[in-house]
Image (tube, coloured by chain):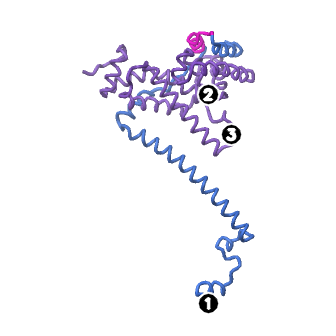
Chain colours: A blue, B purple
Amino acid sequence: MKPSEIKKLIISSLSVDADPKEASMRLEEEGISYDFSKGFGDKILDKLFSAGLTINREVEFVRSMNFAFYRIALTGVAAIVVLLISIFLMQGSLSFNSFLGLSDSYDESIVCLLTGN
Amino acid sequence: MIKESYSVTGENQLLKAALDGDKKAFGEIVTRYQKMVARTVKGMLGDSVFAEDIGQEVFIKLYYSLSEFRGEAKLSTYIQKIAVNLTLNEIKRRKRFFSMFSQKGNNEMYEFEVADHDTEERKEASEIVNKALMAMDPKFRIIVTMRMLQGYSTKETAEILDLPLGTVLSRLSRAQGQLRNILEKL
């Protein structure tokens, strides 16, 4: 069947008065069919009967961990950016001393701060 | 007594045996319904390894929820509902992920490999359908998958998707329009 005919068939299969079963069968005849790979059933049975629920739970756990990790990482990056901006606004530069809050401090003033004299 | 083959056994007997922990009975259920699940999952997510994973999850979830199946609906409807829910959840998860970490468009959330076909024409037909489906809005794609790939009537589609008949009819008409536009560009 030519591509234009396939397109017509697809569109007509969605008409309210079309017979959906007949349309899906015709599409299947034209090569539009789906199936899982070989050994699909065996993989499921192995998961269910050899390792039980654990594997399924592990997969779910890894998935949620991945998602949580991305959320945390994104929040962390946002926090760092905010911190950098606030340091820049407060200290006027992004030098190492600015990070440590020492931009305007001299050795003597640190001693004063520490000893209180 | 455990039977050697369940190929001609009725659905109720199969279910009872599977509930009793009979591996072969559940294997027969997988064999009977795997193509149906593949049409839903691969039609919605594209023909990829991820779709295979979701397909496996469908049957694993079915196994652990067999005791909750009361037999009020057909087993195929029950399995189909699990497949639809897991597939839509996966689409939501991907959408969330792509909206946070990627500038890619919706179409690139899906990938598909065109299976080997005996002729170039059949391969091309398969490619057209996959590309068109992946370009559709998921809420219309599910309607098209149910009707075009599964051959379900509007009433059956409404039952599986838990939607009013009127909603299915209106989405079907809008899906047809969207699909027409997509196919014109292919």
The question of residue A46 being in magenta is answered with no
The magenta region covers A17-29
- Dominant secondary structure (helix, strand or loop) of the stretch shown in magenta: helix
Q: Is residue B50 visible?
A: yes
Q: Is residue A26 magenta?
A: yes
Kind of residue indicated by mark 2: Lys
For image coordinates 54% across by 51% down, the residue present is A69
Q: Tell me the quarter of the picture where residue A34 sits.
A: top right
Q: Considering the numbered disc 2 on the image, is that residue within a helix, a strand or a loop?
A: helix
Check if mark 3's residue and mark 1's residue have beta carbons within 8 Å.
no
Q: Are marks 2 and 3 on the same chain?
A: yes
Q: Is residue B104 above or below residue B148?
A: below
How packed is label 3: few (under 14 Cα within 10 Å), some, or many (20 or more)? few
The residue labelled by disc 1 is: A117
Assess disc 2: are there few (<14), some (14-19) or many (≥20) residues with their C-alpha within 10 Å of its C-alpha: few
Q: Chain of mark 2?
A: B
On the image, the x and y values in percent for residue B75 come to: 42, 20
Image disc number at residue B47 = none
Which residue lies under the disc numbered 2?
B139
The correct choice, above or below, for B161 with respect to B93 in the image is above
Q: Which mark, by number, is residue B104?
A: 3
Query: Which quarter of the picture shows residue B119?
Result: top right
Q: Chain of mark 3?
A: B
All told, the count of numbered labels is: 3
Residue A43 in view here:
no
